[in-house]
Image (spheres, rainbow, N blue to C red):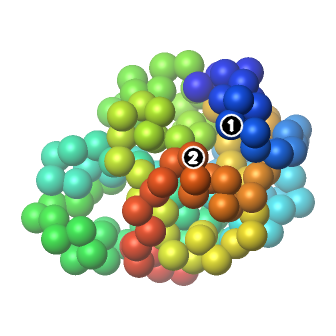
């Protein structure tokens, strides 16, 4: 979802947000430092296959997806990380690894970790490695309606 499409969507939904432009950064920790945002409030998007079905997981930059917890929490037989190669075709208008956490707009189930839900606001990639959108977590939850589960471990 290109930045303008994302901004139009947020505007149509009446969401107040801030656009943050930063120097190019590629890892969640680099982005948090570059944009001066606490890692706990920077939402990173991780793609994984749950019993063969592509799913989106959203978690703070300071955490990592715990595949064992995912498997247990979701009563799944298998949970494995998706490769960037597998994911890039799902988000063709986004730079690889910079997709915003709006999987619902792509027909994907979205799971957010409970630690992310503790934030009053979150920031996330806006489809590229130079811009972030910051908005209230309550608006993210209203627009995406993610399933909130215990799926992470601290890095």
Who comes first in sequence, dot 1 or dot 2?
1
| Residue that label 1 marks | 13
Residue 148 appears at what percent x and percent y?
44, 68
Disc 2 marks which residue? 143
Q: CA distance from mark 1 to mark 2?
A: 8 Å
SS class of the residue under badge 2?
Answer: helix
Q: Nearer the viewer, residue 150 or 130?
A: 150
Mark 2, other Cα within 10 Å: few <14 / some 14–19 / many ≥20: some
Q: Position of residue 5 (x, y in %)?
A: 67, 22
The quadrant where residue 1 appears: top right
User: Can you say whether 144 is above or below 119 in the image?
Assistant: above
Vertical placement of residue 140 versus 4, above or below: below
Residue 108 position in % (x across, y down): 36, 40
Q: Is residue 6 left or right of residue 22?
A: left
Which residue: 16% across, 71% down? 75
Answer left or right for 43 relative to 68.
right
Residues marked 1 and 2 touching at CB (< 8 Å): yes
Quarter placement of the C terminus: bottom right
């Amino acid at each position: 979802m290109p930045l303008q499409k994302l901004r139009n969507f947020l505007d149509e939904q009446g969401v107040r947000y801030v656009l943050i432009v930063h120097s190019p950064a590629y890892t969640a920790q680099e982005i948090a430092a570059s944009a001066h945002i606490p890692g706990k409030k920077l939402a990173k998007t991780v793609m994984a296959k749950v019993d063969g079905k592509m799913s989106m997981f959203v978690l703070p930059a300071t955490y990592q997806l715990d595949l064992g917890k995912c498997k247990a929490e979701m009563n799944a037989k298998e949970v494995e990380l998706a490769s960037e190669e597998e994911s890039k075709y799902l988000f063709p208008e986004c730079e690889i690894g910079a997709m915003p956490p709006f999987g619902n707009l792509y027909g994907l189930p979205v799971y957010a970790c409970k630690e992310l839900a503790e934030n009053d606001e979150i920031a996330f990639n806006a489809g590229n490695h130079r811009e972030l959108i910051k908005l209230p977590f309550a608006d993210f939850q209203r627009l995406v309606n993610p399933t909130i589960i215990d799926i992470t471990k601290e890095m």
